[in-house]
Image (tube, grey):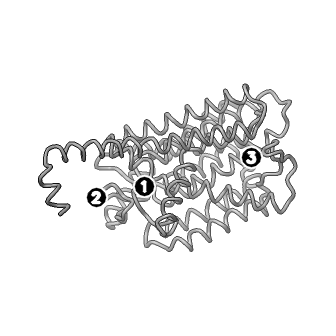
Amino acid sequence: MIFLNLMSLTLGFIIAMLVIPHIIHVAKTRSLFDFIDERKVHSAAIPPFGGIAIFIGFILSTIATTGNQIFITFRYVMAAVILLFFTGLKDDLVKISARKKFAVQILASLLLILLGNVRLTYGHGFFAVNEINYLFSVTLTLFIMLSIINAFNFIDGIDGLAAGLGIVAASFFGIWFFLTGSDIYATMSFALAGSLGGFFIYNVFGNKNKLFMGDTGSLITGLIISVLAIQFNEFNISKTAEWSFNAAPSVSFAVVMIPLIDTCRVIYIRLANKKSPFYPDKNHIHHKLLSLIPDHFSVTLILTSTSIILILLSIILNYIFINVTLQFILMFLTGLTFSFIPSHILRKKQEKIKGKEIKLYPGALKKSIA
């Protein structure tokens, strides 16, 4: 099955690369460019339709490598992906309210949970929870799906970041599903990784042919990764399998930790300032890093590398600790600490600059105070 996985990865990449030039041509011909708001760090006219290429690459690659199985095992996954695809596309074209987008996310998630039976049924001993009853299972899974979908939507703020983190997550799940013999989920993971890879090239190195992921891409990327994360936890219920993780919740959390922690942090800041959780601003970790390192690719490289390190750390802790809850809390605190480091450094830097100004212009400062 290694051939099919490589084929899935390669097809996703090639299809996305072939589709993107046509998307850019149509967008430029019809003057379809990204909306500028408080969250954006660009000023050039750039098409936000990279999600179309990711969608086409993912769908065609998965169908080509799984055949009829895609319509049996993944029909509800595909239905949910298509639903979010058209929602994101409409938002990229004409903008729709955050409430409407959130309502469609709930609908797509419930479609997967209730009809596709994609849900968490076991707690792995997290806070002493093992078997999960149906109602709590549905509620918890819905919360996790919505969290991951919006986390990828929120983190999509600079070149290559959402795609880079998506590639890391999809590749990890793809490798693990391959090692455990879960071939269909492996090919789906690699199809996403390949499609995101094709988009990444144009998004980061496209120059005049650059395009953004848009809500189309971030929503479907978040949805697919949420499905992979949930199934990863479900497939780890048996602790006797060769590649099983005792602390599956901690490991899967580490895979999506950077977008999730960043989302929690900015939502807290917005609510503290009495603003909507969906209010656009520049409080994200990548905005803070850009203030320190004014280069998109460098910031993306730092955050994707950190994501890989966090995943490796969670795997190491899996073999050191027995208590799942302790591992999860430790990973959460590690991620939370990291998320505040750029803000802390930036604050110290600003205080240092302000201190120098006071020494240089003490008279002007007294006058301004008076």
Q: Residue at x 56, y 49 (%)?
A: 261
From the image, state whether disc 1 or disc 3 is nearer to you: 1
Q: Secondary structure at mark 1?
A: loop
324 w.r.t. 142: above or below? above
Looking at the rendered structure, the kind of residue marked 2 is Ser
* Label 1 Cα crowd, 10 Å radius (few <14 / some 14-19 / many 20+): some
Q: Quadrant of the C terminus?
A: bottom left
Q: Is residue 48 visible?
A: yes
From the image, state whether disc 1 or disc 2 is nearer to you: 1
Inter-mark Cα distance, 1 to 2: 18 Å
Looking at the picture, how far across and down is residue 361, in whole percent?
13, 48
Q: Which residue has dot 2 on it? A: 43
Q: Which residue has dot 1 on it? A: 283
Q: Secondary structure at mark 2?
A: loop
* Label 2 Cα crowd, 10 Å radius (few <14 / some 14-19 / many 20+): few
Q: Is residue 20 left or right of residue 322?
A: left
Please state which of residues 293 and 222 is positioned toward the viewer in this rendering: 293
Looking at the rendered structure, the kind of residue marked 3 is Gln
Looking at the picture, how far across and down is residue 290, in whole percent?
35, 45
Labelled disc at residue 149: none
Labelled disc at residue 231: 3
Q: Is residue 9 left or right of residue 40?
A: right
Contact (Cβ within 8 Å) of mark 3 with mark 2? no
Please state which of residues 218 and 76 is positioned toward the viewer in this rendering: 218
Looking at the picture, how far across and down is residue 87, in whole percent?
55, 68
Looking at the rendered structure, the kind of residue marked 1 is Asn
Marked residue nearer the N-terminal end (1 or 2): 2
* Label 3 Cα crowd, 10 Å radius (few <14 / some 14-19 / many 20+): some
